[in-house]
Image (cartoon, rainbow, N blue to C red):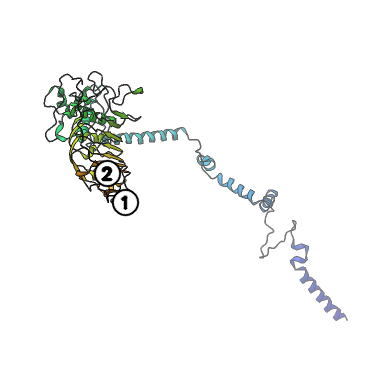
Amino acid sequence: KSSGDSASSSKKKRKKKKSSSSPSGSSNSLNTDGQPLFTKGGGDVRNKPPPSLADIEAAQQASVDPLRAAEAERENDKQKVNPKFADLHETGQWGGLSKWEKYGICVLTLGVIGVAVWLGIQFGGGGGSGSGGEGGENQNTVVQTRAPTMSPSMTPTLAPTGTGYRLTTGLAMMKEISPSIALPTNPEALKGAKTRTGSTPQMLAAEFILYDDAQKLSVRDPTFLERYALAVFYYANGGCSGDWITRTNWMDPVNATNHCGVAGGDGKWHGVFCNLQGRVTEVKMNGNYVTWKLPKEFVAFTELSTLEVSDNRMVGELPSEAISMPKLFTLLLNNNDFEGVFPFDLVKQGAASLDTLWIQENSQLSGRVPTSFCSLGSITLDCANFLPQPVYVSPDSSETTFVADCKAEPEGISPREYTCNTEVGVPVEKPADAPVPAPRICGSPAAGT
């Protein structure tokens, strides 16, 4: 028994010792804060300092409000940003700059401006010397880079600086729309044209516009060439010689008025009508005893919608550029003495809006009417002179062969009115009591024009 009790007691002690060595079985495995002395991996945490109350609260807040934790992290990052960019980071605007930084920016800006000005002077042609005012006769300060192309885009690309520029550029623009031999190359040669018997109508008109006209239009004014074209019409077609029956306000040698007139129509040249911008839109000189050829200078009337010169004494071939303006709608040339082949194709190509064409009673005018004229509203011509002749399809039909051909086209469009004229024109006569103007030089057309 003694030996048995001893063995049992020894076994109980060993069991008790094993039980006391377990971390979870004894109070000796915990520190004073109630935390285990040993970590799960076996490390000893007895020397670790206890967490502060602030750390514990921060951990608790992070676990409860992640948005607040993220905001705190951004505040921490903000402290690392350069203070000068802090406002830019938050509001999109720069922060305050020091005095020297502002001085540096100003110096840099002035340097860039200076370089730009220097480059402009070197490569922009602005370094020329000599300035010309309106009073200088030949004080040109800008060299024309290229010749004008066509009205109304013929206005110079560089601003005029003096009378000399106006003279040379204006003459160059006039030469673009006139026969080349009708004008000199030097504006000085125009002086005194109205006193020389060999002057052309273009020279007289150019002298008037450049030297004598009270309006003194700038070459950049789109009406500059329109007024020149009207002046050519006056000198070349009987206005100057006194053939016109009515020429109210035209080219008054004392006080030349605006050809469009002013409010109420005062001063308007007879037969000339303009829009609100002062551009010529209608020229109506019917039955006014207008003579000679239709001036090619009419190409300057880029806003013209109506040209009526019927029942006059006009002659010669019709220049296509004078009857194919882009906005031309009505063209009445009947009862004159025009001759040659009518330029149907060129007229339709330039005057796409043309609606009314009257060319009858011109016994020497001929041509072939293309189907492109099927879309016109009214065509009247001399049947015997034009092909295809507008004969009727059959004796009992009112439809002409031309209209039938138009309907056969894919578009199937035909003129509303296609009239075959059989009458002979009656020449217009000047009234016996028409006033006779004082003798004056009105110009002689240049050879070949």
Mark 2 lies on residue: 348
Q: Quick one: label 2, few (<14), some, or many (20+) residues within 10 Å?
A: some
Q: Is residue 141 at all visible to an observer of this figure?
A: no
Disc 2 residue type (three-letter) = Lys
395 shown above or below 155: below
Whole-Å distance between the Cαs marked 1 and 2? 19 Å
Query: Residue 228, image x and y in percent?
Result: 23, 29
Residue 167 as seen in the image, left or right of residue 73: left
- Judge by depth and name the residue closer to the eye, 355 or 44: 355
The quadrant of the picture occupied by the C terminus is top left
280 shown above or below 7: above
Query: Residue 156, image x and y in percent?
Result: 26, 33
Residue 262 as seen in the image, left or right of residue 345: right
Residue 23 as seen in the image, left or right of residue 260: right
Please report the residue visible at 58 percent of the width from the left and 47 percent of the height from the top: 74
Q: Quick one: label 1, few (<14), some, or many (20+) residues within 10 Å?
A: some
225 shown above or below 403: above
Mark 1 lies on residue: 407
Disc 1 residue type (three-letter) = Lys
Which secondary structure lies at badge 1? helix
Q: Is residue 284 at all visible to an observer of this figure?
A: yes
- Res. 323 image quadrant: top left
